[in-house]
Image (cartoon, rainbow, N blue to C red):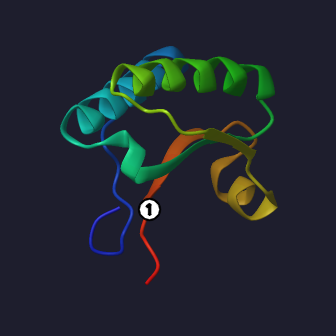
Amino acid sequence: MAEGEIFPLGIARSRKKSLQFLLQEVNKFFAKEDANLYRIAVGCGYALEEQKNFHQDVLEFLKKHGFDGELGAYQVGATIGVHTGPYPIGFGMVQKYETI
């Protein structure tokens, strides 16, 4: 997301390659950023087994970068599913902030 709009990071030709690409992007981002400054989660549609494997892969990448928080795992709802189809999988993060 940039300037309030969602933009693709790239294109991959198979499910396996797209997941590898996403993991590479996660790795690149957290090579520059402190992963502990973010709330992080993975999400999916119906492919819960695939999500479990992806969740573990993402967690391993994050731990390499010193992440010691919890990695959430969520199933997308009907609103997102209408736009993505039944088998989306993805990674999301929101920067943490301190309240005053």
| Disc 1 residue crowd, few under 14, some 14–19, many 20+, Cα 10 Å | few
Residue linked to disc 1: 96
Identity, as a three-letter code, of the amino acid under mark 1: Lys
| In-front residue for pair 30/36 | 36
Q: Secondary structure at mark 1?
A: loop
* Residue 13 visible in the picture: no
**Above or below, comparing residue 26 to residue 36 in the picture:** above
Q: Quadrant of residue 25?
A: top left
**Above or below, comparing residue 26 to residue 18 in the picture:** below
| In-front residue for pair 94/90 | 94
Residue 6 spot, x, y in % from top left: 39, 62
Residue 71 spot, x, y in % from top left: 59, 38
Residue appearing at x 48%, y 18% in the figure: 60
| In-front residue for pair 92/63 | 63
Residue 50 spot, x, y in % from top left: 70, 21
Residue appearing at x 44%, y 62% in the figure: 96
Residue 92 spot, x, y in % from top left: 50, 49
Residue appearing at x 55%, y 40% in the figure: 90
